[in-house]
Image: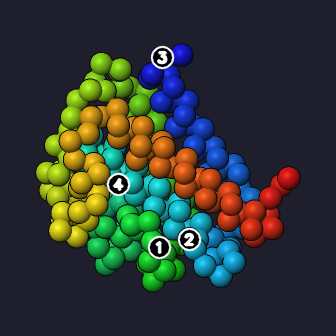
Amino acid sequence: MDLHEWMVADLASVRSKLFDTVVQLIPAQRWHEQADGGGSTITHLLLHVARHQDLAVNTVIRNHPPLFTTHAASLGLADAGPGVELPEKEDLAATNCVGDEALLAYVSAVFDGTQQWLNDLGTLALDIEPHCDYRLTNKAGLAEADYPWLYNMWNGKALWWFVQWPVIGHAHAHAGEAISIRNRMGLSPF
C-alpha cells in the first residue's frame, strides 16, 4: 500500500468510526448530553473534528474559505465567530444551538470534500508547505492573537502533516473519546 492509498483508507476508517460506532448508536437527542455530568458532548466532538478538517483541507491546503462559512447559519452559529468550536474545551452556549441534521450535513460535507480532494491528489504534492498563517487569517477570518496555539502548531508544516494530524490523527483521537462517551452512556454494543 502506498502513502496515498493509506491516507484514503485511514480517512474512511475514521469516518466509519464516527458514523458507525457513534452517530448510529447514540440517539440524536443525547448528543448534547455530557456523560457523567462533565466533559465533551458528541455534538462538540463532531463539530470540532469537522472544523479542524475543514480548516486544514479547504482553507490551509486548498486556499478556499472553510465550508463552515456556508453552514454556520443552518448550524445556528452565524453569530458565533469564525473560531467557534476550534478549541478542545467545548463552548456549551454554542453547541446547544446546533441541531443534529445541520451538524450531520456539515460533517458529511467536510468528509465528502476531503475524500474527493484526496482521491484526486498525487503523492508528489505532499511536501508542499502552504501559507498557513495568511490563509487562516484571510480565508477563515481568524486572528493569530485569538488562536496562537493553532497558528503555532500549524505554521511551517507540509501538506502531508495536515493530512496526518488535523485530518486523520486528531479525528481518530476524538473518535476514541466519542466511543468512550458512548460507553459511559451505557450504549456499547458489546
Q: What element carries label 2?
A: loop
Disc sitting over residue 40 in the figure: 2
* Res. 33 in view: no
Please say if the residues under marks 1 and 2 sit with CB atoms less than 8 Å apart.
yes
Mark seen at residue 2: 3
Q: What element carries label 1?
A: loop
The residue where tag 4 is placed is 67
Q: What residue type is labelled 1?
A: Glu
Q: Which residue lies furthest to the right in this view?
A: 190
In percent of width and height, residue 120 lies at 38, 25
Q: Position of residue 190 (x, y in %)?
A: 85, 52
Residue 56 horizontal side relative to residue 32, left or right: left
Check disc 4 and report its element: helix, strand or loop: loop
Q: How crowded is mark 2: few (under 14 residues within 10 Å), some or many (20 or more)?
A: many
Residue depicted at x 21% and y 34%? 129
Left/right placement of residue 58 relative to residue 19 reads: left
In the displayed structure, 113 sits above or below 79; it is: above
> Mark 2 or mark 3, which is nearer the start of the sequence?
3
In 3D space, how far apart are the residues under numbered discs 1 and 3 (Cα atoms)?
37 Å
Could you give the CA–CA distance between mark 1 and mark 2, rounded to whole angstroms? Answer: 6 Å
Which of these two is toward me, 76 or 35? 35
